Image (cartoon, rainbow, N blue to C red):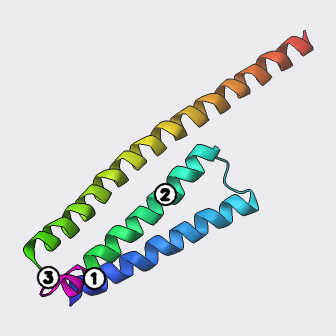
């Protein structure tokens, strides 16, 4: 019972975080590349799917064949690995984005210094 409550709470929290992320994009308060937006939205959707699969798994699979159950949980595990890959791609995109912003800042600083001379 406690596990179901925790998973349901996790589903709600992840959904709220995805909504807040989308609001930030629409308001312009979050500066990120298009790739980062895709990775973040994909990660949220995959995480939601995994949590729903965990929550409903025992109920849906009750009375089904062992092969069906193994297939179901293998799919959940594959989604988990996919989420890890998406997270790593997001980290890479974030590093590239901020590296480019830092380069732009240095270029602006150098050009400003040259104008002063």
Q: Quadrant of residue 106?
A: top right
Q: Are marks 1 and 3 in contact (CB under 8 Å)?
A: no
Question: Is residue 59 inside the magenta stretch?
Answer: yes
Q: Nearer the viewer, residue 39 or 111?
A: 39
Q: Is residue 74 magenta?
A: no
Specify which label sits upstream in the sequence, 3 or 2. 2
Per the image, label 3 sits on a secondary structure element best described as loop
Between the C-alphas of marks 2 and 1, the distance is 21 Å
Judging depth in this view, the residue of 9 and 57 nearest the camera is 57
- Location of the C terminus by quadrant is top right
Considering the numbered disc 1 on the image, is that residue within a helix, a strand or a loop? helix
Q: Which residues are magenta?
A: 57-63
Q: Is residue 21 left or right of residue 79?
A: right
The image shows residue 90 at horizontal and vertical percentages of 48, 45
Q: Which residue was labeled with disc 2?
A: 42
Q: Which residue is mark 3?
A: 64
**Which structural element holds mark 2?**
helix
Question: Is 4 displayed left or right of 92 in the figure?
Answer: left
Q: CA distance from mark 1 to mark 3?
A: 14 Å
Q: Earlier in the sequence, mark 1 or mark 3?
A: 1
Neighbour tally class for label 1: few under 14, some 14-19, many 20 plus, Cα within 10 Å: few
Residue at 56 percent across and 47 percent down: it is: 36
The mark that comes first in sequence, 2 or 1, is: 2
Residue that lies at the very extreme toward the top in this rendered image: 117
Q: Quadrant of the N terminus?
A: bottom left
Q: Position of residue 57 (x, y in %)?
A: 23, 79
Q: Nearer the viewer, mark 3 or mark 2?
A: 3
Q: Is residue 39 above or below residue 117?
A: below
Q: Please tell me which residue is depicted at 59% across the width and 29% down the height of the picture.
A: 99
Residue located 67% across and 62% down the image: 24
Label 1 sits on residue: 56
């Amino acid at each position: 019972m406690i596990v179901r409550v925790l998973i349901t709470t996790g589903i709600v929290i992840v959904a709220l975080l995805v909504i807040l992320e989308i609001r930030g994009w629409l308001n312009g308060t979050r500066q990120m590349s298009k790739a980062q937006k895709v990775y973040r939205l994909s990660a949220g959707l995959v995480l939601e799917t995994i949590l729903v699969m965990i929550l409903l798994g025992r109920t849906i699979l009750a009375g089904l064949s062992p092969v069906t159950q193994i297939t179901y949980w293998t799919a959940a595990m594959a989604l988990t690995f996919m989420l890890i890959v998406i997270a790593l791609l997001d980290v890479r995109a974030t590093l590239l984005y901020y590296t480019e912003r830092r380069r732009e800042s240095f270029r602006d600083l150098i050009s400003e210094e040259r104008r002063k001379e």
